[in-house]
Amino acid sequence: MSTRLPASERREQLLAVALTVFARQGFHDTAMTDVAEAAGVTKPVLYQHFSSKRELYLALLDDVGHRLRTTIAQATSDAGGPRDQVQRGFGAWFSWVATQADDFRLLFGSGNRRDVEFALAVSHVEDALAEAIAPLIQAGIDTTHQQTLAWALVGMAEATARRLVADGKPIDAERVAAHVSDLAWAGLRGLRPG
């Protein structure tokens, strides 16, 4: 039995443990009993915080997405210019992928695409990332063009990360970020107003 914690701390502990369990076993192969046992609590304690496995999983998707957005926003907030923003944004992304593999697997695992509600939750994270990036693209282009390019940058980062994670090898986040940011910057630098 685990130590009695204040409700907010217990909730955070349960989310952290559930993240590991779901990332390794997937949604369908994980039972609430698995999470409770891994957290060292009883199922009733787990159900005091989350009424169902689905509610717990959705809370995890939201939590991981929020932390990812915060990580990238903090990395780019004091950049010295557009090129630095691109480098720092990709640097934060690939560092997150390299150090938070469970977070990445949970948020961008293929199982989420098969469930409409989970896919929508992941889509909200992707939307938020693109919405944060779009205004940073200052090239005298209209808002729709900015949003399209922001989505392209999110897609490029996500697709590259998926491939790296699938390879199962250690990720040199700094090197990968440098390569991808060079490609992105070359394209962004070549934009023409219109």
Image (cartoon, rainbow, N blue to C red):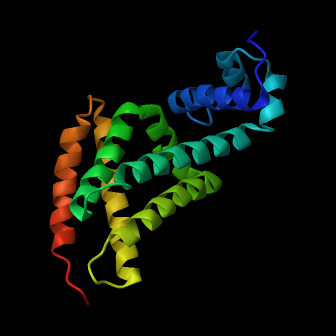
- The residue closer to the viewer here, 3 or 126, is 3
Relative to 70, 15 lies left or right: right
- The residue closer to the viewer here, 33 or 189, is 189
Place residue 49 in its image quadrant. top right
Give the position of the N terminus as an image quadrant.
top right
Relative to 17, 3 lies left or right: right
Residue drawn 52% across and 32% down?
Answer: 23
97 versus 7 height, above or below:
below
Residue 129, how many percent across, how many down?
45, 59
Residue 112 appears anywhere in the view: yes
Relative to 91, 131 lies left or right: right
Residue drawn 52% across and 56% down?
Answer: 125
Give the position of the C terminus as an image quadrant.
bottom left
Residue 4, how many percent across, how many down?
78, 16
Residue 191, how many percent across, how many down?
20, 78
Place residue 172 in its image quadrant. top left
Relative to 147, 12 lies left or right: right
Residue drawn 53% across and 59% down?
Answer: 123
172 versus 124 height, above or below:
above
For this orientation, the residue located farthest to the top is 1
- The residue closer to the viewer here, 186 or 55, is 186
